[in-house]
Amino acid sequence: MKEFIAPALAFGLAFALTPLCRKLAFRIGALDYPGERKVHRQAMPLLGGLAIYLSFWAVSAPFLLAEGGGQLQGLFWGSTLILLLGIYDDLKGLSYKVKLAGQFAAAFILLAYNIKIEFITLPFQEITFLGYFVIPLTLFWVVGLTNSVNLIDGVDGLATGVSAIAAIVMFALTWGEFPLIPVLTLILAGAALGFLPHNFSPARIFLGDTGSLFLGFLLAGFSIMGVTKQATLTTLIIPVIIFGLPITDTFYAIWRRFRNGQPIFKADKGHIHHRLLDVGLTTRQTVLILYFCSIYFGAAAIVFNRFTGFSRYLIPLTFALFLLGVKRLEGLSDLLSTDRKREM
């Protein structure tokens, strides 16, 4: 039972600190103004991620101090660099090149503290040690997942809730296997859930890049330190399933922009949450549907991790069903239109 005291403390601390971060954002001008791609209609304070960062590391401080110069220290310095990068971006704005450079620098900090993907196990294969590919695969995973969480942060409460769900799933996968990772993932979930009441629609404060980059980076680090260390048949696949929603949305965004001849890093309104809003769903309905999608992927990851015998056949089906649902959004639009006509 004592394992749940720390997450509860993180929840309470984040809930209490968020209004202070909101006031700070207004004071220093860290605001997100309405625009063509924006859902909100008035200037909104950013820096919500600062409350999550402070809550998480305040509660995790005893573990950090007890460990000394171990991997948790690397996670602290890397996530702090990411936080500072996000704060500056929320205040002044950064080009995608500078943001990527900062993310790679933070990922290299993880490598310096021996946080890396050393081997993979894929369906129908034995354990494969990566050798020279350790560095590029680790960098790709950390930077890729950090940006994936950042990209889905377009609707009130979406990135916060999805990150909390992913952290809880990682807790379920690592509980009993590792001494520290399960507790840390619950602390992060507690901090995110403590912030969520302020961030859920109608939001009073946004995560900002301060929060979305921090959450993505920390989740990437936890997945390397915990989930990828399990010698199951699908070690590399399980983390991909956990983050199925942001990863699928990111790959779809890259493909969409490439197909349309647009720069890959140019923002647009083609993300899954935008499409759900376009068919007539409210912000809350959109977020709740995508929460369900995250739970769907998380449950699949837990089942496949426990029953590897048949998971190798069903993993592609998991993504296929999700993509089929995305393709059917036009049908949802027609259904909603029919219902509105009947009401009239």
Image (cartoon, rainbow, N blue to C red):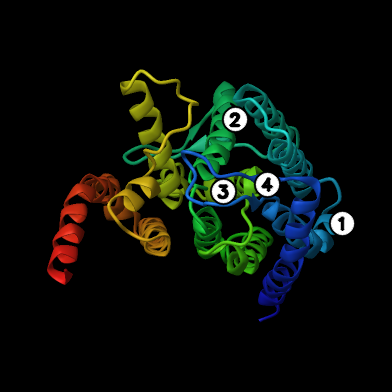
Among numbered discs 1 and 4, the one appearing first in the sequence:
4
| Residue 233 visible at all | no
Q: Name the one closer to the observer, 28 or 72.
A: 28
Discs 2/4, front? 4
The nearer-to-camera label among 1 and 4 is 4
Q: Residue furthest bottom?
A: 1
| Number of the front mark, 4 or 3 | 4
Three-letter code, disc 1:
Leu
- Looking at the image, residue 341 lies above or below residue 84: below
Q: Position of residue 101 (x, y in %)?
A: 67, 25
Q: What crowding class fits label 4: few (fewer than 14 Cα within 10 Å), some (14-19), or many (20 or more)?
A: many
Q: Earlier in the sequence, mark 3 or mark 1?
A: 1
Question: Taking the image as drawn, is residue 292 in sight?
Answer: yes
- Coordinates of residue 230 in the picture (x, y in percent): 52, 50
Q: Which residue is mark 2?
A: 139
Q: Are marks 3 and 1 in contact (CB under 8 Å)?
A: no
- Mark 2 residue type: Leu
Q: CA distance from mark 2 to mark 4?
A: 31 Å
